[in-house]
Image (spheres, rainbow, N blue to C red):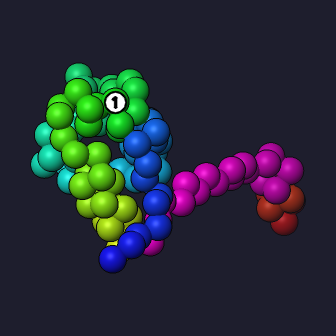
Amino acid sequence: MAYKRWITENITFEEIAESYPYLISPLLEMGIKVIVCGDVQWGTLGEEVEKLGLNIEEVLEKLNKIVEEKGGPQKNISLNISFGSDSMKDENKE
């Protein structure tokens, strides 16, 4: 079965950690470390796969299957909440 190519050999480990954190464990099971000494590893997935002598197409197929099942990259949500002093002043007037 052909899966959408969310993950390519040129993806950086930083992008995996940020957008696809659920891939860290499956990658570790394949012997590919995303986090080294508490920091995200430098380089690309393809570079590391080549160093380890793994088959890049097999790795990409497994990872893209997982991403497809999970629905793509995780959405990063950032909330900007501020409590203005004006709203507090209005409440205290009563």
Q: Which residue is mark 1?
A: 47
| Image location of residue 3, percent across then percent down | 41, 70
x and y percentages locating residue 87 in the rendered image: 82, 56
On the image, the x and y values in percent for residue 4 come to 47, 67
Residue situated in front as seen by the camera: 62 or 54:
54
Instruction: Please say if 76 is above or below 94.
Output: above
Chain part drawn in magenta? 70-88
Q: Residue at x 40, y 27 (%)?
A: 43
- Badge 1 crowding class, 10 Å Cα cut-off, few under 14, some 14 to 19, many 20 or more, is some
- Choose between 38 and 43: the one closer to the eye: 43
| Membership of 81 in magenta stretch | yes
Q: Is residue 35 visible?
A: no
Q: Main secondary structure of the magenta part?
A: loop
On screen, residue 44 above or below 62: above
Check disc 1 and report its element: helix, strand or loop: helix
- Where does the image place residue 32, in percent across and percent down from the top left? 21, 38
Compared across the picture, whether 55 is left or right of 72 comes to: left
**Is 6 or 80 nearer to us in this picture?**
6
